[in-house]
Amino acid sequence: MPKKLPLTKVSAKPARGVTPLLAEVRGLILAAREQVARAVDSGLVALYWHIGRRIRQDILKEKRAEYGAKIVAALGRQLEMEFGRGFSTKTLRHMVRFAEAFPDERIVSALRRQLGWTHFKSIIYLDDELKRDFYAEMCRIEKWSTRTLEKKIGGMLYERTALSKKPDKLIRQELAALREEDKLTPDLVFRDPYVLDFLGLRDTYAERDLEAAILREMEAFILELGVGFAFLERQKRIMVDGDDHYLDLLFYHRHLRRLVAIDLKLREFKPADKGQMELYLRWLDRHERKPGEEAPVGLILCAGQRHETVELLDLEKSGIRVSSYWTDVLPKEQLQKKLHEAVRLARARLAEKSQAKTSTKRKKLR
């Protein structure tokens, strides 16, 4: 009987000199896989929208809800038998809702380059058209994963932006500029309040504790601020007339193309805080602003704010935003109630302001 030869193990280690080539070829394969997956998902989104529109047209023609339910159920059974679970009755209902929520094919075509079907499913059942447009466009610009998108929706990001507190007409204008020109404005970037529960601060703490906690949890803090923020410095020294002043945190925002100065306060906002921030912004504008950048903006993060005080100071003209921060997350129902009330009050104040201006103009014309 012939003697068995010992088995030789094939080494997984690449031959000398092959490693750089292997890394490059692996990169090409993985990039191609990702492109193919994205193309397939984009194609499915287009298909689902067209199916949804076609079914919707048929249902609307009949104008009977019970007919619509029956036709979708029957169609779903037939398609599922032939094409699988991706075309079940439940999925067909998602498609119909998709076509209802996004009736413009051009907008869907632009969004599907970045948003997959799971993104759209998270957005289409939101009850407000402007809210849907906001999340879709921000998701496109900031390239959110589905998980991040759901977290932003759950954290009521839209209601916390300055944009949501404006009249519907102005919201539509800003969202149109974002869609057509990728133009991101401070109203889309800054929020109120900021939820800083991840800092782990409890009971009493000093400003230095708040700053230290932010530095320790910088990644989570930047995620709460939003995509585009890059941290530059802490305790930025600003010398004016021989006196030293220290700015708590300095960031740069890539999309806004400007420096963002952040001042932390453990108390409510006070009018004197405006003067302090204006000093920081004028100094940064003179000494730190680079050619091609927009003027620096300031964010005063405080434990609370008095809306009338903030309104009377007209801070936006000075490039200053005032926002509250919460170190504890409220239960969802309380959070919704609080933010919806804040949006309602802000819009009411804007309406009063607009009426007062109109009244003043009429008096002058007389």
Image (tube, helix red, strand yellow):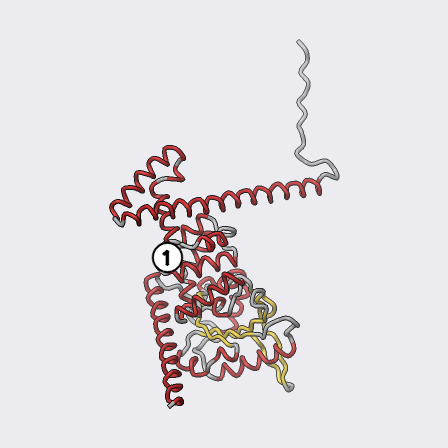
User: Which is nearer the eye, 239 or 121?
Assistant: 121
> What is the crowding at mark 1: few (fewer than 14 residues within 10 Å), some, or many (at least 20)?
some
Q: Using the rendered image of the protein, determine whether residue 324 is visible from the camera's viewpoint.
A: yes
Which quadrant would residue 288 be assigned to in this image? bottom right
**Could you tell me which quadrant the N terminus lies in?**
top right
Q: Secondary structure at mark 1?
A: loop
User: Which is nearer the eye, 262 or 125?
Assistant: 125
Residue 24 in the image: above or below residue 132: above
How many numbered discs sit on the rendered protein? 1
Residue at image coords 40%, 40%: 86
Give percent across and percent down for residue 211. Answer: 53, 70
Task: Tell whether 37 sits left or right of 22.
Answer: left
Give percent across and percent down for residue 333. Answer: 32, 62
Q: Amino acid at mark 1?
A: Leu
Residue at image coords 68%, 18%: 5
Which quadrant would residue 34 be assigned to in this image? top right
Q: Residue furthest right?
A: 17
Residue at image coords 56%, 71%: 260
Task: Tell whether 1 sits left or right of 105.
Answer: right
Residue 133 in the image: above or below residue 57: below
Give percent across and percent down for residue 130. Answer: 40, 62
Badge 1 is on which residue? 126
Q: Using the rendered image of the protein, determine whether residue 202 is visible from the camera's viewpoint.
A: no
Residue 235 in the image: above or below residue 216: below
Give percent across and percent down for residue 255. Answer: 56, 65
**Could you tell me which quadrant the C terminus lies in?**
bottom left
Task: Tell whether 223 sits left or right of 168.
Answer: right
User: Which is nearer the eye, 109 or 143?
Assistant: 109
Q: Residue furthest top?
A: 1
User: Which is nearer the eye, 217 or 208?
Assistant: 217
